[in-house]
Amino acid sequence: MSGLSLIPTEKIVERLRYENPWWLNKQIPEAYSSMSKRLYFKLFYPYVIEKNVRRALVLMGPRRVGKTVMLFHSIQQLLVEKVNPLKIFFVGIDNPIYVHLSLEDILTLCKKSLNQSNLIGCYVFFDEIQYLKDWERHLKVLVDSYPETKFIVSGSAAAALKWHSTESGAGRFTDFMLPPLTFQEYIHLKNMNHLIYDGNIIYGDKQIPYCLTHNIKALNKEFVLYLNFGGYPEVVLSEKIQSDMGRYVKNDIVDKVLLRDLPSLYGIKDVQELNRFFTYIAYNTGNEFSYETMSKESGIQKDTLKKYLEYLEAAFLIKVLNKVDVNAKRLKRVTSFKVYLTNPSLRTALFSPISETDSEMGNMVETAVLSQWMHREKLDLTYARWKDGRNEGEVDLVLVDDKKYKPVWGVEIKWSNRYFEKPQELKSLIQFCKANSFEKALVTTIDQAGLKKADDLSFSFLPASIYSYNIGDITLKMKNSN
């Protein structure tokens, strides 16, 4: 075996036994078994036990969203379903002890430590696989060499995972994306489902089934907590971490990605510049930028900026939203765009928590709404902004039908009740609806709900917290039914 002489084999075998306690006691560590499962677990687990397709399962997502926990919950479920504990292997690739080993070497040691001659019917979990150089090549070889074995891997240096797994793993990998917590999952993890009931809203002339609340004050209180602390399961469940959010999230999520993962993947020389740039974006989440102003304000050259935006988006830290005009036509040259954090609580980690009366609340709510939509792949979300003569306007969120290049709907995201009282003041939205022959649109509020008419148009008003909850809820239902 290559390079094994550096660390004695028995030390590595010892480590493997430590990482796989179920070989002895048939149980996963208490720290994991006591944690609530994410709602996404139900979607993920069927892929774990899927045996008909010869593919490795790749669990991707940003740091700290609960990927390792999900692997352990999968192992727990396999044990519940009476899979032989000696047929389940878990290896944390980020442990330095494995540094000179290939995946094949590690597997050989697993077999050795259990005196097994083959891996038929085994489930092999590799956590944090991005720490292995050329992991996708190694993994592809394993999938081909061990057709009777299921490989499940996780990784968070998402950028690498994303493009590597698509190119070299073609037909060999199934990707599963685990995003930050939705507001719906947050309510579920905090055992607050009693705040929600099944109801209906009126949208245009239709009744649509919708989750509503009896207590909007209580839900909004949770929503503000979600904006500040809600993206990460551990933070949600620990007040200790919330009180030291800066250290926990910043060190663990931001610094590791910005100072370590991205520079090593892309060969970024000026790490401090990237860090400064991210801080600048985080502070301005939800604002419109142009390369010109961005370059001027950050002091970074335009070409470098474009690269940084690409890297940060690949690492699931930001989402860039492109602009369309009033008829949802793409603009020939991308000159301006909006940038959002993929998770509003990243902003809290870098700066400080906000309260519901702060001036940043509008942008944070917009960031939160967008982060709920990000769980739905293949949606062409944009925002509209236009200027013709004296007419100028903006609509916060527009869904464009890719094939027809036509807008499907527009949503105005507000943290204010003002427009509920004065819907005729929604001039941009009215103009947008008329330009696209829409009869209806949705507008969010702080706590007001109901239908209002303006200029022959029908506007459904909903609290932003309710709207955010429902995006997550509907997305999960869609994914479950697929």
Image (cartoon, helix red, strand yellow):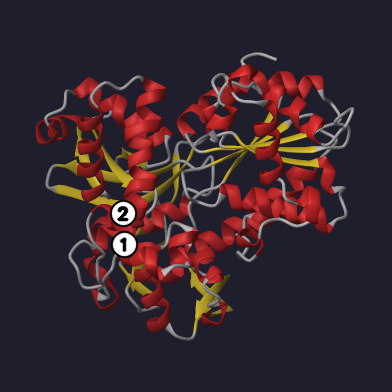
Name the side, left or right, on which 76 lies relative to 253: right
Please give the name of the residue rendered at 50% of the width and 36% of the height, measured from the top-left corner.
402
Name the spot of residue 321 as percent of width and height, x first: 35, 41
Quadrant including the N terminus? top right
Name the side, left or right, on which 169 lies relative to 412: right
Q: Is residue 151 above or below residue 356?
A: above
Q: Amino acid at mark 1?
A: Asp
- Quote the CA–CA distance across marks 2 and 1: 6 Å
The quadrant holding residue 330 is top left
Please give the name of the residue rendered at 42% of the width and 61% of the height, measured from the top-left corner.
439
Q: Is residue 481 above or below residue 184?
A: above
Q: Amino acid at mark 2?
A: Arg
Name the spot of residue 17 as percent of width and height, x first: 72, 42
* Within-10-Å neighbours for mark 1: few <14, some 14–19, many 20+: few
Name the spot of residue 466 as percent of width and height, x first: 45, 71
Of 170 and 458, nearer the camera is: 170
Q: How many marks?
A: 2
Residue assigned mark 1: 244
Can residue 27 be seen here? yes
Q: Secondary structure at mark 1?
A: loop
Q: Secondary structure at mark 2?
A: helix
Can residue 482 be seen here? no
Q: Which residue appears farthest toward the top when viewing the image?
A: 2
Of 92 and 480, nearer the camera is: 92
* Within-10-Å neighbours for mark 2: few <14, some 14–19, many 20+: some
Name the spot of residue 175 as percent of width and height, x first: 63, 36
Q: Is residue 257 above or below residue 225?
A: above
The quadrant holding residue 121 is top right
* Circle 2/circle 1 CB separation < 8 Å: yes
Residue assigned mark 2: 247
